[in-house]
Amino acid sequence: MTTQHTQQQILVLGGTGKTGRRIVARLQGQGVPVRVGSRSAQQPFDWTDQATWAPALRDINAVYVSYYPDLAEPGALETVSAFTDLAVAAGVSRLVLLSGRGQDRAQLAEKHVQSAGVEWTILRSGWFNQNFSEDYLLGPILGGEVVLPVGAVPEPFVDADDIAEVATAALTNNGHAGQLYELTGPRLLTFGEAIAEISAVTGRAVNFVQVSPEEYADGLAAVGVPAGAIELLTHLFTTLLDGRNAQVADGVARALGRPPRDFTDYATSTAATGVWARA
């Protein structure tokens, strides 16, 4: 059984992102003082501007560390390591790191956090359910065709709400320090199967098309996606979807004492919002 951890204030980096804004909402709902870490916040935080770090860390004793754009990015390890060291020096006593499942570069960042000398919890996750409904794949689904450089490799898609609930527990309760939670959904689906489920619950024809990594990169470039983003996306699809993550894990159950949310439940409830029904 966990008990409440006395907090002065929690800093949530990426506080307007998929997991961050959900964590902020949960903390606010519990009456926990929380500072949103983003470039648009009242106290701005920018990973690319170290001058914003110390002010954001003032009077903070727990931090949710979500690095943008991804821990697989060149330079991410050095940046997260420098932030971790500054946070500890500023008096932070608890760090919760959102990491990437199956990512060697991300695991180097994990090791630095684990050796920082304060309480830590690592949350490893892969592809979010919400990638299909928030930003990244929403446009293609609305257009009726999702084109990706991935075949029949299954993925245990994890729900961002599950990640947020685990992170909130790790930030506010005792009993999670020193834990590495691999967070997945309860079953494996290919991207094609996930798209088919979305098509079924929406009653709209949404097709999945597999292309080569080269064709995928060319398609992104043709619509103006920056070269750095193309490189990152191609890297993620061609490395992480090679079967290394094709198994479910028990992180959600260990952290929360309940099973993770199933993709069908996500798809059904998301379809009911109308987000996939826009013209």
Image: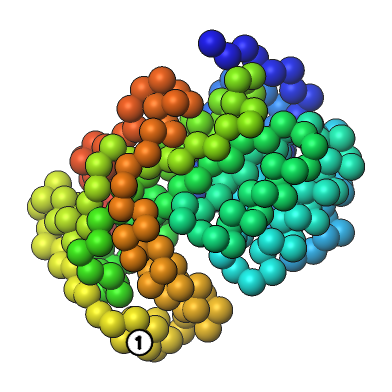
Q: Which residue is drawn at the image coordinates 46% and 73% (left, top)?
A: 235
* Color style of the picture: rainbow
Is 105 located above or below residue 55 in the figure? Answer: below
Return the residue nearer the eye: 239 or 219. 239
Is 108 located above or below residue 23 in the figure? Answer: below
Residue 165 visible at all: yes
Q: Which residue is mark 1?
A: 214
Q: Position of residue 136 (x, y in %)?
A: 40, 63
Q: Which residue is drawn at the image coordinates 62% and 12% (left, top)?
A: 3
**43 left or right, relative to 139:** right
Q: Residues within 10 Å of mark 1 (few under 14, many from 20)?
A: few
Q: Residue furthest right?
A: 89
Quadrant location of the N terminus?
top right
Residue type marked 1: Glu
Q: Which residue is drawn at the image coordinates 39% and 50% (left, top)?
A: 128
Is 53 located above or below residue 30 in the figure? Answer: below
Q: Position of residue 29 (x, y in %)?
A: 56, 23
Q: Position of residue 214 (x, y in %)?
A: 35, 87
Report which quarter residue 87 is drawn in.
top right
Quadrant location of the C terminus?
bottom left
Return the residue nearer the eye: 42 or 137. 137
Circle 1 SS class: helix
Q: Position of residue 269 (x, y in %)?
A: 26, 38
**83 left or right, relative to 261:** right
Residue 25 visible at all: no
